[in-house]
Image (tube, rainbow, N blue to C red):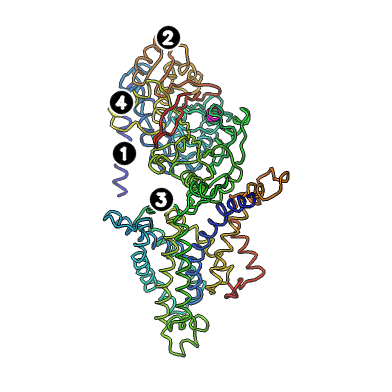
Amino acid sequence: MKKFLMATAATALMSGSVMAASHSTEVKIGVILGFTGPIESLTPAMAAGAEMAMKEVSDSGKLLGGAMVTPVRADSTCVDAGAATAAAERLITSDGVKGIMGADCSGVTGAILANVAVPNGVVMISPSATSPALSTAEDNGLFFRTSPSDARQGQVLADVLMEKGLTSVAVTYTNNDYGKGLADSFAAAYAAAGGTVTATTAHEDGKADYSAEVGALASAGGDALVVAGYVDQGGPGIIRAALDTGAFDTFVLPDGMIGAALEEKFGDELDGSIGTVPGTESEGAAMILTMAEAAGFSGEGPYIGESYDAAALIMLAMEAAGSVEPGDYKTKIMDVANAPGEKIYPGELAKALEILAGGGDVDYVGATAVELIGAGESAGSYREILIEGGKMTTAAYR
Amino acid sequence: MELLNAFVVLSNFVLIPAIAYGSQLALGALGVTLIYGILRFSNFAHGDTMAFGTMVVVLVTWLFQSWGINLGPLPTALLALPFGIAGCAALVLLTDRMVYRFYRVQKAKPVILVIVSMGVMFIMNGLVRFIIGPDDQQFADGERFIVSVRTFKKLTGLDEGLAIRTTQGITVVTAVIVVAVLFWFLNRTRTGKSMRAYSDNEDLALLSGINPERVVLYTWLIVAALATVAGTLYGLDKTFKPFTFFQLLLPIFAAAIVGGLGSPLGAIAGGFVIAFSEVTVTYAWKKVLGYALPEGLEPTGLVQLLSTDYKFAVSFVILLVVLLFRPTGLFKGKSV
């Protein structure tokens, strides 16, 4: 067995050097996502999205005069900061990646940024970390994200509620970084807009019984109940208990609560409830679906477009800077992502590379209508959802 | 009218949920207390025994549903209950045969049996997840409500609504029947009496010719039935998810100890004490007081003693207080 392992390792090493020799340059980009852990069902498609962009660039042969881009996967586990840090350390020190597409969950993303990316000076673009705390994290200009901060979602939710005339609500959130961050940002935005939060209660996921939580929220009252939870965790339990006891009949559902399970579980009982979920009406969203299908995976899942965009941004910035070194290209990411310049949609990376090589300017739109603001995070466009006749319908984009 | 509204709110959010939850805890605690009284150890595997029994009920319910058999307005699970009890009984008898008997013959100390029961707990835990998976399972069917908020408001014309779910009604009715049958069995039948004798004084019982293996067998059968009924009621009323039964272990033990380990009456009282304190301590009284107090005195705050995050802490605190000041529990059980 030992011999076999040695032989495999030797072959792998040799083939690696052969590969490197046969091409002028090879650029490695890390793909660090939670391939095990709570979102393990989402990450394979996200990684496939990012790798699709890398393959597109490699095939075009136009990055820095024909560089090959190789993805290197690593497991962030989504929850274990220690394991994620070690995995990222390995990517940089032993694989020598020039940029990181990831990480996914907010907690591990912050840990990798502080412990690995900043000390080593490597650019990180996260497709899905949405915690508001990351906006102000110390990053030396190395951290970006193609997903919006939840602070933005809080604002969008507050706007939707005020427009509907719902001026007092109770809030319950799932007891973690995501839920707490979202509940806080919503409460701040809502209060600023003139609304009243009657009560804020945390709930633990995975419980069978939420009657105590709902009892407290019902006592506080309000026009609607904001459930900042997960659709396959405690969220439906809260809604069920609130419906059964007649505590609330209108619910406000942020992105974690939007899923097919909602329609299955409640049917038309939720009519009149509203929700928000990141989404755009840009044509890029449809294009990435077809591309994913052609590449042999489903593009329906969340954050696939964001992953594609994150990887694309790294490579376009490299071309714009004329260098694969993170220290050189980190300042170019905002330039390629935002106007002015030629609009670039998914599948047009070759065209973008050509323009950049010719000294032109691009405005990367990508799958998710990327527009980086502030410290380098997506401005965020959201789809406003209204539940009607037991179905989730799109009321507006904002 | 105001007072009536206050009472309706209180019933809707405190009394009815607490009574249903209390009945489920009481049935669970009865099982724990019987094992403690007769087999003389704290059975940590009880929560997962409940999960296993309920799992069998869920599987049989699905089978019946696929055959189109149902009970009309009542949940089909009631029909599947006997099968669940049989399955659960088979499992606990098997465990007793393979694990507990070995230690019983050796006259092992209770603390060893407690650790053994933890091992059994993990195995049962894995078994249930292996068969049905770790996810939520839906198996409730039939009519959802006895009284729904809308019909109640229409009937009474009150501002506040009251909902009684079918599962809550069934829980209370079933609990009453099961407890009545159990007490009749323990107090009136020969086997029941021999079980109590064995529990009171093992040596004297053996001298008077009671067959210990028979007592053990009956105990396990009753415990399997209690665990399956409690688990199924809890699953119907809330949801079936293997992990929640493991979490139920704490309030169940708190109930059994508060009532007095080994005392069936105590287990029932303990169940309701724990359930009511969990719900009332964490309840926000704003709405009730708003109706009950005269105008001008309504509270502006939530009037919540403890945040709902501390729900489980309540059972812990009660447990500690009872152990400190009355180690034998409210009903003079055995001291722990």
Residue A118 in view in this figure:
no
**Which amino acid is tagged 1?**
Ala
Which mark is nearer the camera, 2 or 1? Answer: 2
Q: Which residue is mark 3?
A: B136
* Distance from Cα at disc 4 to Cα at disc 1: 39 Å
Residue B10 in view in this figure:
yes
User: Regarding mark 2 in the picture, which secondary structure is present there?
Assistant: loop
| Chain hosting mark 1 | A
Q: Which residue is mark 1?
A: A10
**Figure check: A77 above or below B260:** above
Circles 4, 1 touching at the beta carbon (< 8 Å):
no
Does residue B263 appear to the left or right of A348 in the view shown?
right
**Which amino acid is tagged 2?**
Gly
* Distance from Cα at disc 2 to Cα at disc 1: 43 Å
Does residue A356 appear to the left or right of A82 in the view shown?
left
Which mark is nearer the camera, 3 or 4? Answer: 3
User: Regarding mark 4 in the picture, which secondary structure is present there?
Assistant: helix
* Distance from Cα at disc 2 to Cα at disc 4: 31 Å
Which mark is nearer the camera, 3 or 1? Answer: 3
**Which amino acid is tagged 3?**
Asp
Indicate which disc, 2 or 4, sits on the residue closer to the N terminus: 4
Find residue A185 and report its horizontal and vertical position in percent.
58, 32
Circles 2, 4 touching at the beta carbon (< 8 Å):
no
Give the camera-side residue of A107 and B54. Answer: B54
Q: Which residue is mark 4?
A: A290
* Distance from Cα at disc 3 to Cα at disc 2: 57 Å
**Which amino acid is tagged 4?**
Thr
| Chain hosting mark 4 | A
Q: Which residue is mark 2?
A: A359
Q: Is the same chain shared between marks 3 and 1?
A: no
Q: Is residue A160 magenta?
A: yes
Which mark is nearer the camera, 2 or 4? Answer: 4
